[in-house]
Amino acid sequence: MVPARCLGPCAILAQVLLLGCSLVLCLGQNETEPIVLEGKCLVVCDSNPSSDGAVTSSLGISVRSAGAKVAFSAVRGTNHEPSEMSNTSMTIYFDQVLVNIGNHFDLKASVFQAPRRGIYSFSFHVVKVYNRQTIQVNLMQNDFPVISAFAGDQDVTREAASNGVLLMVERDDRVYLKLERGTLMGGWKYSTFSGFLVFPL
């Protein structure tokens, strides 16, 4: 049963059914605060709907997928430096995807492209093997370094440059790893690069 105060703007909900969603109506404490109860769709009575990819009616009702999730995790499964690492961009390439919910991680380019604006979590763990020099790995956002990690112990056979961060990311921003200093001669098997959407904005 729909509360009486929502009958006006929610009359347009007949259009929502055309979207093929399993829908549960929900109402917050005010007309711009939705509460997700269950189901796969969320109806938001909002006079100022955001442009985050939701379907929005002329009455300010936006419908977005409450189950839309974004996450990826890539790993380096082989142990030798590929020819791609000789490129001028020095992007660190991965060759296996463990998780790619939403398919926003391009394995061939080893670049994540954000599908929507929001707060994202990213972490990486880049292994250097039999390499008596320091490496520096940068997490890049649209070709600008955000965080770095170093590995430079010359007395161990394996060492990792690791770091993690929460980032505000805009739609279509590109996030990837760059080898800023040193080489990965000997391989970087078991290196990982992961990220996920914490919440949309």
Image (spheres, helix red, strand yellow):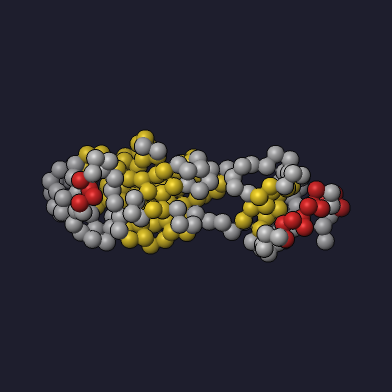
Position of residue 178 in the picture relative to residue 65 (left or right): left
Residue 89 appears in which quarter of the rendering? top left
In-front residue for pair 71/22: 22
Residue 129 in sight? no
Q: Position of residue 187 (x, y in %)?
A: 19, 54
Q: Residue at x 41, y 43 (%)?
A: 174
In-front residue for pair 51/126: 51
Q: How many marks?
A: 0
- Above or below for 182 versus 189: above
Q: Position of residue 147 (x, y in %)?
A: 35, 39
Q: Residue at x 67, y 52 (%)?
A: 63
Q: Position of residue 194 (x, y in %)?
A: 39, 53
In-front residue for pair 159/201: 201
Q: Position of residue 171 (x, y in %)?
A: 51, 43
Position of residue 80 in the picture relative to residue 40 (left or right): left
The extreme right residue here reads: 4
Q: Residue at x 68, y 42 (%)?
A: 49
State which quarter of the image contains the N terminus: bottom right
- Above or below for 43 versus 149: below
Residue 148 appears in which quarter of the rendering? top left
State which quarter of the image contains the C terminus: top right
Q: Residue at x 78, y 52 (%)?
A: 12
Residue 108 in sight? yes
